[in-house]
Amino acid sequence: MRSSVLPGLLAAVALLAACEDAPDPEPLPDHLPVSPGDRYVAMGDSYTAAAFAPYESETNGCLQSIGNYPHLLEKELGLELTDVSCGGAKTESIHLKQQTTTLRERMDPQIDALTEHTALVTISIGANDEEIFPSLVVSCAQELTPKERDGAPCTDRDAGDGDDSFAARIDRMEERIIDVLAAITEEAPQARVVFVGYPQFASDESCRQFPIAEGDTELAERVNILLVEAQERAAAEAGVEFLDLYELTEGHHFCADDPWVAGMHPAGDAAQWHPYPKEQQVAAEALAELVA
């Protein structure tokens, strides 16, 4: 009995030793690269639609540019694009309800563009929720500042707003983004999903392009950073990729010598308070490097 068992034991030991000596297999990539012909759905608000950068591709009032990063990425990688981004979109516009555009067109929830065959989804959303971004660039910079240019009228108001403060609104936005991303991954389970964060648009400066009160520049910069940090946390919570566009555009804000986001007086192909073509090119290049 011993003699019949021993050869088997020796063989098992030899096999184990061989396994230990063998090199570890290469780990599989976390995400498979997209390929030419893959179906790509772009979702988002006006920072994805990018009106006038350089010009519109449709007339439904969503103000999509044919030079926005979804169209540039489609061309670069040979993808089959469905761009449902729309100016004014909120998180609810993605998966819950129709959106009314600037031309009074009723647009279906953006998530309706997804199918089981969708290979790539990019999304950027959140700043229109509870008027976060409009409150900063319109209410703070254009309405409050002329009344108290040397003070900090927006900061003072924000300090007393409680649940309506920028930070509180951004916290609620983050939770809604998590819900949006969960809905997307459920609807398109095979798709690679990339959340594109907002670029840097504000700094610690006030200028003609962003005429906010000097005392409010710190608040403006903080709101920009809080928005992006909330987006990044939401993406991590939902288990999707995040493209840090803030880092890639740092130093090219409203008041920069070389702005990639237009301020109050656009100096080229962009809508007021929205991306120039350069910002969209940077986003497209970074996405191509990430997903291809």
Image (cartoon, helix red, strand yellow):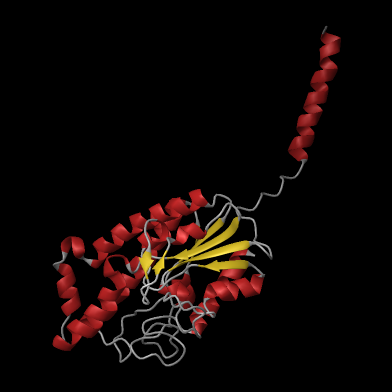
40 left or right, relative to 150? right
The image shows residue 264, relative to residue 183, as above or below, that is below
Q: Which image quadrant for residue 34?
A: bottom right
> Residue placed at 31% from the left, 73% from the top?
133
180 left or right, relative to 83? left
| Residue 21 percent location from the top left of the image | 77, 40
27 left or right, relative to 146? right
Q: Which image quadrant for residue 147?
A: bottom left
| Residue 218 percent location from the top left of the image | 27, 77
> Residue placed at 55% from the left, 66% from the top?
82
For the C terminus, which image quadrant? bottom right
Q: Which image quadrant for residue 119?
A: bottom right
> Residue placed at 45% from the left, 89% from the top?
258
The mark total stands at 0
Q: Which of the two residues, 205 or 117, is positioned nearer the viewer here? A: 117
The image shows residue 54, relative to residue 88, as above or below, that is below
| Residue 106 percent location from the top left of the image | 39, 67
> Residue placed at 22% from the left, 79% from the top?
140
For the N terminus, which image quadrant? top right
Q: Which of the two residues, 23 or 285, is positioned nearer the viewer here? A: 285
Q: Is residue 213 visible?
A: no
The image shows residue 44, relative to residue 276, as above or below, that is above
Q: Which of the two residues, 85 or 251, is positioned nearer the viewer here? A: 85
134 left or right, relative to 114? left
| Residue 129 percent location from the top left of the image | 31, 65
